[in-house]
Amino acid sequence: MVSSMRKIFCVSAVLFLLSGALSSCGGAGVAKITDEFMEILNEPASDRNIERANDFLKANLGRLSDEQAGEMLLLWEEYALNHDVGSVDYERIIAEYAAEIPDSLTKLLEYKALEQSSPIIFDATLRVDRRELVSRTLNIEDFIVAHREDQMIRDDALWLYKRHVNALLMGASNSPVFDYGTHEFSRDLLALYDDVVAERPDSALAAVLTEYESYLAGLGYVLEYDQKEESAKFFETCNRLVSEAERLAYGAERTH
C-alpha cells in the first residue's frame, strides 16, 4: 500500500520552496496560478476536489518552470494521499507530467511506482527476492548520490532508501532474518551481504553491511526474538545502521 510506502511530505516545507521559486521566476502570472491552485487545496479533500486539482495541473503546469511544476505536483500528491492513497497512481502521474517536471522528480516517481506495483513488504511479508531487494536498494542509493543537492526529492528518496535498507537488515515479521525455530541467522543472506561488499565496496550499503556482519558475528549468528533484551539490542543496532546508511549516502564521514 502507498500509505505504508511513503513518508508524508510537510506541506509548509513545499510551500516555502514554491514561494522561493515564485520570487525568482514567473512573477504575477505564476503567483495567480499558485493562488488558484491553493484555493482548491484549501478545501476539504474529496474525490471531486482531487480531480479538480488534477485538472488544474493539466491545464497549467506547462506555463511554469520545471521546478515550479514539480513543487505543485508534490502538493497535489500530498493532498490526494492524505484523503485516499488509492487516488494516487504513480504510473499515470509519470505519463501525464514527466514532460513538465524535473527529471530527478520523474525518476523518484518511477521508484514510487515500482514500490506501488511491487511493494518490497506486504502483509508483514517480504514480497521480493532478496537479490532484487539489494538491486533496488543500490539503485535508490545511486540516485541519492547523484542528486545530493536536490531538496525536492530528498525526503522521499531517503525514506524509500531507509525502508529498503531496513528490510535487508531486519526482514519482516513473516520473513525474519533469524529463523524462528533454530534462531540462526540466514546463511544465504550472509552470502548475499558478502556479494554486496565485494561488488560495491564503495557504497554506503556495503559499509553498513560490513558493520552489521561484525555485530552478527558477536552474537554467534544466533538470536532468540523472544529474549527481550537481546531483541531490543538487535532492533536498536539495525535502526542505527539504517541511519548510518542515510548519512553515508549523503557523503558524511563514518561515525565508527
Image: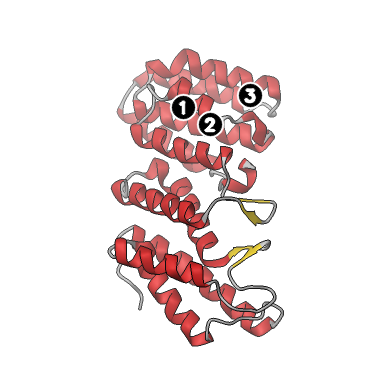
In front: 175, or 76?
175
Q: Inspect the image, locate mark 1, and give the three-letter code of the amino acid beneath it.
A: Ile
Q: How many marks?
A: 3
Residue 73 sits above or below residue 183 on the image: above
Q: Can residue 200 be seen at all in this image of the molecule?
A: no
Contact between labelled residues 1 and 3, with CB atoms less than 8 Å apart: no
Please report whichever mark, 3 or 1, sits nearer to the chain's N-terminal start: 3
| Residue indicated by mark 3 | 50
The quarter of the picture where the N terminus appears is: top right
Between the residue at mark 3 and the residue at mark 1, the CA separation in whole angstroms equals: 17 Å
In front: 83, or 203?
203
Contact between labelled residues 2 and 1, with CB atoms less than 8 Å apart: yes
At 47% from the left and 28% from the top, the residue drawn is 72
| Residue indicated by mark 1 | 94
State the mark number for residue 205: none
Residue lying at the far top of the rendered structure: 59
Q: What kind of element bears circle 2?
A: helix
Between the residue at mark 1 and the residue at mark 2, the CA separation in whole angstroms equals: 6 Å
Q: What kind of element bears circle 3?
A: helix
Q: Inspect the image, locate mark 2, and give the three-letter code of the amino acid beneath it.
A: Tyr
